Image: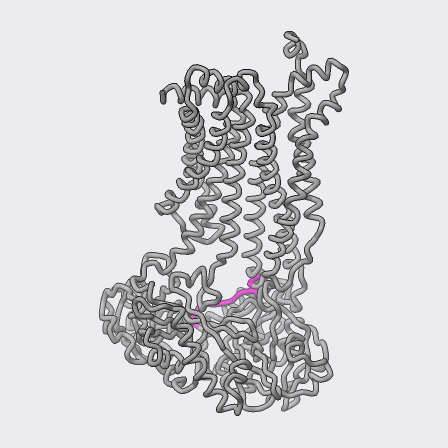
Amino acid sequence: MLTNWLKIAFINYKKNGLSTLINLFGLTIGLTGFMLILMHWNDEESYEKWNPKKDQIYAFQTYHTKEKSYGVNISYPMAYTAVKKIPEIQDYVLFSQPDAAYKMTTKYTSVFQENGFMTSESFFNFFPFTIISGSAKDALKTDTSIAISKQTAKKLFGTVNAAGESVKFDNKNYIVTAVYELPEGNSQIKPEFVITAAQQLKNDKENWGTYNFGCFFMLKKGADPLVVQEKFKRDILQLRAAIGAKESGMQVQQYMDLYGPNDMLLTPLEGLKLHTKLSWFATGDFKTIMILFTLSVLIVILSAINFINLKTAEASQRAKEVGVRKAIGGTRSSLMMQFFLETFMICLLSYLLALALVELLLPSFNKFFNKDIKLNDWHVYAYSLGMVMIVTLLSGLIPAFYLSSFKAIETLKGNFARSKHGIWLRNGILTLQLMISSFFIIGGLIVNSQVKYMMNKDLGFNGKQVMMINFSENTPKPWLKYERLKTELSKIDGVEATSYCEAVAASVRTSISNMDYQQQSINAQNAPMDYNYLQFMGVKLHKGRWLDPALASDTINNAIVNEAFVRKFGWTDEQTLQRSFQPGFDNKKYKIVGIVKDFNIKSLKYEVGPMIFFHYRDTDWMRFNVYNIQVKIKPDDIEATVNRIKKFWGTKAEPGYPFNYYFINQKFAKTFEEYQKQQTLFTILNAMVLMVALLGLFALSSLMIEQKLKDVAIRKTLGASDGTLIFGLTLQFLWITIAAVLISIPISYYLMNEWLKDFAFRIDMPIWPFIVSFCVLLILTFAVVSIKAYKATKVNLVTYLKYE
């Protein structure tokens, strides 16, 4: 029996070669996209899986209800008090600098080492790396202890057995207490060296309001994180608010509402990469992955729709076969098994071809996402094979059910092709397919418009030819270093101007403080700067004046704010220039002397937040945080000027340190990369969807028009013109297309409007993508169907009328 089924299957594959190839092509393309996106998702979910304590470790985040914003910092007293007051918390680890870098010197060599962590001493309890030399116990007990990775040990000492060796940096001698091996799995916690933040912890021991640290909590086994969150809000956040309220003379709830945070969130360690709201480390984009995954599944569904449609359209060709086999005793179950086997063979071949195609595309896919994914995860094979089985069931059982349900007497008369349930099934499925195609066209055009809008938007500053150079902060007086570099760089041929600001476009380095005026308070980004910075960056003055170095007050307590600052307080421009406020980072009031136009230093996905600009020497701690110098280069010969600056840096400015620089406009452009990639992927998926849909439409129209060739021959004999015949044959498909687009419009509008809500700077929902989708699908439907319709008008009349 199986042999007969296989013979019949191959006969039908050959007889319907076009539809077989289209089904095979569509499923292969759909499964390839599905597997690639699944591998990307699986890779993002695999971070921190190596950690044996991952189920107990949670990242700490705060939430400010008034600002509707998340934070990732905690104060030292909040962390150690939480362990004392909340029984479910077993331990904590703090970190203050997950990207520390120093020029390290040993008796063997000097190396500039990056990717270091400054943490509290329980680090290795949370992240139990394999120890090669030394011991993890008490590895960070003192402020002169350092643990290093195997790679760092080889660079500094030429061997991994480096425990007990001495290394000097930051004007101190450190003793290597442990050499560890970094985990092989995906992880964001891969420090090349770890030192204790003992001095900072000592300074902040009683400072409840100083949020200088990131934090992981380890919960006891079986502890409910939701219970811990409630207890933390009740016992820790309330205590922190009570202390702050007492110092400021306010009510506890009033203080909490005004300053926050008033809520917190614990994110499992495994979800740190993809599911956290905010993190000290790079975060993934779960929403985008889900959109891409859904779209890839839609393509597979489209392929399944093609399968169902073509199989039911072939019903008239198989009807007599079914009728004969039923007439000689064939059972319905045996017929269904045969049709199901035919579908399964196509799906299985598509799966094997998709695996081969994934292997071919993987290098380009990895380059696009900057990953190193390999096709060696059983989950990918299992889930994609599961998808094949679902497609087989959808694409096989439905046609099998309909084909095997034919009544022998009707099928032998050839009546099914004209039956209403056969026509409605095909038309309904084709409508769904065209609806999905319409959504992809509309969505693709809106995504393109949004990305183009962001790329062309006036940012409010000019970062062209502005070079951002980070210098080492491991110096006693960094502001004096900046002043020296400013003088010396200005002498280099090709340098137009120099300046400094802490708040740099596209930089992740930020400092935010509360700004108090009477009973009002807002959070604003601190932007200590040199006097000329705003003019240097081409920022526009809205009201008032610039800071002037000739005025002593401009060095002491005068400030410039942006328009967002004014809006947040609800002031007019005139009121703003008459007001003084108390910033949280200082004990003196600051007077506003100027208002600048809003300008973006973050991605255009976010609104421009309140900012305060003041001279970096206003406060002691701001002077000690000077970390960059920005250089505007003349456009004549940029490459030569960069080389001269590089030579100066390596010989005079910071010998032995890397020349760490970037051009601000280029760095800011990278904030668009995520959306440009979304645009590219949407375009590719759009093309795949249209290709699969149109090929399916062509095959379906071919089969359905072939069923009407006798009607065409009769009408042509009676004098119908080719144009009339072509229009008549395509009219049914045009009506289906019109219905599909009209149904897809409100769905597309809702979904794309939800996508646009993520952007602070967004386009208004345009009408033209909906019109374009309508016109394009109508034109493509007519073009695809009319090709076969035109051929139908050239039939040999004798062939179809000789028996009439």
Residue at horizontal 45 percent and vertical 26 percent from the top:
339
Total tally of numbered discs in the picture? 0
* Coordinates of residue 180 in the picture (x, y in percent): 28, 65
Q: Which residue is more in the foreground, 485 or 276?
A: 276
Q: Measured along the vertical axis of the image, is residue 362 above or below residue 251? A: above
In this figure, which colouring scheme has been used for the structure? Answer: one colour
Q: Which residue is more in the foreground, 3 or 26?
A: 3
Residue at horizontal 49 percent and vertical 48 percent from the top:
293
Q: Measured along the vertical axis of the image, is residue 268 above or below residue 368? A: below
Q: Is 662 within the magenta?
A: yes
* Coordinates of residue 770 in the picture (x, y in percent): 69, 47
Residue interval drawn in magenta: 655-667
Question: In which quadrant of the rendered image does the N terminus lie?
Answer: top left
Instruction: Determine if residue 517 is in view.
Output: yes
* Coordinates of residue 784 in the picture (x, y in percent): 64, 30
Relative placement, left or right, of 168 versus 752 is left
